[in-house]
Image (spheres, rainbow, N blue to C red):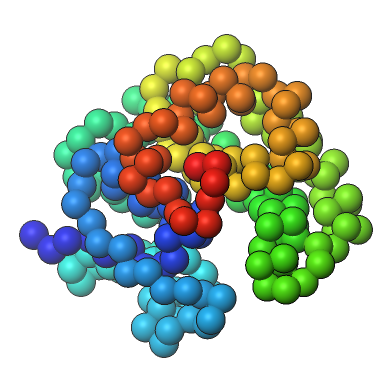
Amino acid sequence: MATPILHGPAYSTYVRSARLAFEEKGVAYELDHFDFMEGFPPEQQARHPFNRVPALTHGDFTLYETVAIGRYADEAFDGPSLQPGDPQGRARMTQICSLLDCYAYGPAIGKIVIERLVSPMLGRDPDEAVIAAAVPEAEKAYGVLESFLAGRLFLVGDALSLADLHLAPNYAYFLMTPEGEAITSRTPDLRRWWDNVKGRDAMMRTRPEFSAAG
């Protein structure tokens, strides 16, 4: 059988989420790493019409969007389930993934992490106004994520799911910023969740060089 190939940079949060799904399933895969800060190769533009990452090729099958790739990894291969067995649990998992994409990623990663961590790497000063405007949005999103835990080990019940794998790479980068440290200090259940997740073998195997936290 063909080996699944994930296309995208190892430092991308979304690529790492997709990798985590294959790692947690115990499925052998290849990572086709490229640096999208230097531009998207033509092959990736053909795989993903919106010039994003990751994309997946598995034989003649191609797929993009991280949640779709995670579900494919879970449903197409043997290994521990990464989705709750009941409809309500799966709905909650999907809701949390959507929340992360729509409300958490933009302020926490797209603004705070980019300005605080990436801009200095590119020789630019952080835009403090952008960061300040993003803090309330990020704080609200992480407060909502905190409410889903309510003392549980994972975001959806007591078993790891794609929701946890969607959050973990984002959380790792966010925690590297002073704003993320301050916000997450007020979410003790998320801190406990992170302590439970960060040392998993899959997390260690997918740890990007850029990250000092995940």
Q: Is residue 5 left or right of residue 94?
A: left
Residue 110 placement (x, y as % from top left)? 69, 58
In the rendered image, the residue lying farthest to the bottom is 42
Q: Is residue 184 visible?
A: yes
Q: Quadrant of residue 199?
A: top left
Q: Residue at x 57, y 20 (%)?
A: 192
Q: Position of residue 82 (x, y in %)?
A: 34, 34
Farthest residue to the right: give it: 129
Front residue of 25/156: it is 25
In the image, taking residue 197 as reference, residue 132 lies left or right, namely right
Q: Quadrant of the N terminus?
A: bottom left
Left or right, residue 179 beside residue 84 = right
- In the displayed structure, 186 sits above or below 30; it is above
Q: Position of residue 131 (x, y in %)?
A: 83, 54
Q: Is residue 61 above or below residue 186?
A: below
Q: Is residue 171 left or right of residue 40?
A: right
For image coordinates 51% across by 25% down, the residue present is 195
